[in-house]
Amino acid sequence: MPFQSPVVVQTVKTGFPKAELYLPHISRGPSDASDRRINQKIHEAVQHLVNSQGSLDDPRAEMLGYFEQKTNEKDYLSLSLFNYAYTGGAHGLTLQHSLTFKQSTGQDYSLRQLFKPGSGYVARINAIVGAQIKARKIDTLEPFRTIRPDQDYYVADRSLVIYFQLYELTPYVFGFAYFPISVFELQDMINEEGPLGPMIVND
């Protein structure tokens, strides 16, 4: 595929009482319209994370929002938004929400859309995640059974990274549970028109 310049990702600081938010702002993509769509979806996701944390009424409460860029190449952008909040109790809580976009259209993708219809991607990923849990000797809160069809993920370094929120699979002390899967392990079921398609091309 022809070379496409990565989009420009700038950090914009905003906030409100007891909260500081550092947001990604996208520019210089293939079109202004797609940049606007991506930025709108980012803002909606950040607002959802803020709302999910609950009230900051506790005098000690605080909130910090930030992000990590995972992929910015081959017409795709994948990033993770984080929101840490202390609202009282023993410790704060960090939430993570990841978004993967096609830069030229602004479309975002659920996990299901990365694969061919009827491909059985859930079963394949379950087998890989289960094997990693065993090999890495990860202590889980309950025996692992299955991912959700819309499980959280991001794309990085020619890998699909499946992850679980705090308390979703492992104890709090473990942090987020990440399971990187090489795109070449999934090659036969990948939707080549989606974000993983260009990642299986050796260029």
Image: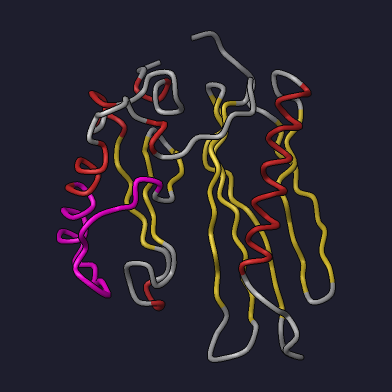
Residue in the foreground of this view, choosing between 184 and 107: 107
User: Would you place residue 155 above or below residue 199 in this image?
Assistant: below
Residue for point 37% across, 40% down? 160
Say whether residue 55 is left or right of residue 2: right
Q: Residue furthest top?
A: 2
The mark total stands at 0
Query: As drawn, is 26 to the left or to the right of 72?
Result: right
Quarter of the rendering occupied by the C terminus: top left
85, above or below 125, in the image: below
Looking at the image, which residue is at 54% across and 65% down?
A: 95
Foreground residue among 80 and 40 = 40
Q: Quadrant of residue 50?
A: bottom right
Q: Is residue 83 magenta?
A: no
The residue sitting at 43% across, 18% down in the picture is 193
Instruction: Name the residue nearer the viewer: 88 or 133.
Output: 88
Q: Which residues are magenta?
A: 128-150
Above or below, 167 relative to 162:
below
Where does residue 34 sit, x and y in percent of width and height?
A: 70, 25
Answer with left or right where residue 78 lies relative to residue 196. Answer: right
Horizontal and vertical percent position of residue 59: 76, 91
Look at the image and say whether residue 135 sits in the magenta stretch. yes
Q: Position of residue 102 (x, y in %)?
A: 57, 26
Residue ID at (16%, 53%)? 131
Give the quarter of the image for residue 157: top left
Classified by dominant secondary structure, the portion drawn in magenta counts as loop
**Quarter where residue 57 is shown:** bottom right
Pinpoint residue 98: horizontal percent, then vertical percent.
53, 48
